[in-house]
Image: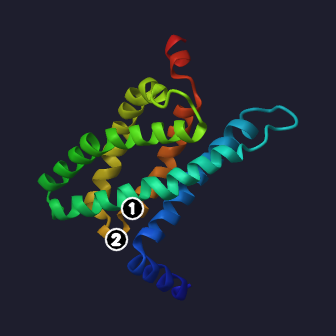
Amino acid sequence: MSRIIRVVKETFRKYPMIANSTVYGTMCVGAEFSQQILTKRILNKTEPPEPIDTDVLGRYAIVGTLISPNILYFWYKWLDKAFVGTAPKIIVKKLLIDQFIMTPPFYVVFFVTMSLLEGKKDLFEECRQKFIPTFKTSCVFWLPAQAINFMLVPPAARVIYVGMCSFVWINMLCWIKRNDYNAIKEE
């Protein structure tokens, strides 16, 4: 077991982007897969059960491996250099900058990229429809999660910690993406 831990640590030290991309991508696909199992197999009792949508899993693999972790890797690297330390004042600055400067364009990239991968004609329609509720929900989830991140998590483990939180968050995001927000608002 200690050899495995040593190899993992060495991989993260030598190849941080590849390691972070692999873990974050796995978290994204795992979150979407668990969301599909929940909605298609557990909550929906039709026989035979709906098949797992591998095209959707593929889209989450692309976004979760090639796009999101690379943005986050460089973002957190910059943020840690720009705001050094764990003093409460520094933490608050990091939280606010992360949530209100990085998060909005990050969600635009997510919705637009997913729309592009889905072949939608209007790449911004879903973003316009779901951005505000997604951002509000993310404030409730991510501000406490990032406070823990910036206070307690070592810089080398930040993307992985965010990846684990993202597993929970992406389950919520998958639900938001899967549902028609206008229909929910009208109910």
Q: Residue at x 59, y 32 (%)?
A: 178
* Residue 83 visible within the image: no
Mark 1 is on which residue type?
Val
Q: What element carries label 2?
A: helix
Q: Which residue is drawn at 42% across and 68% down?
A: 17
Q: In this view, does 136 lie to the left or right of 21?
A: left
Please tell me how crowded label 2 is: few (under 14), some (14-19), or many (20+) other residues with Cα within 10 Å: some
62 vs 135, left or right, is right
Q: Is residue 7 left or right of residue 17?
A: right
Residue found at the very far front of the displayed protein: 121
Position in image of residue 164 (x %, y %): 47, 57
Single out the residue that lies furthest toward the bottom: 3
- Residue at far right of view: 48
Neighbour tally class for label 1: few under 14, some 14-19, many 20 plus, Cα within 10 Å: many
Q: Name the residue under label 1.
A: 159
Are the two marked residues, 1 and 2, in contact with CB atoms closer than 8 angstroms?
no
Judging depth in this view, the residue of 157 and 115 nearest the camera is 115
**Where residue 120 sits in the image (x, y, percent)?**
57, 31
Residue 45 visible: yes
Task: Look at 38% across and 79% down and name the residue there.
Answer: 13
Please tell me which residue is depicted at 48% across the width and 63% down the height of the picture. Answer: 21
Pinpoint residue 117: horizontal percent, then vertical percent. 57, 42
Q: Which numbered disc covers residue 156?
A: 2
Q: Is residue 27 above or below residue 133?
A: below
**Amino acid at pointer 2:** Ala
Residue 160 at x, y percent in the picture = 43, 63
Which residue, as the protein is rendered here, is positioned at the far top? 186
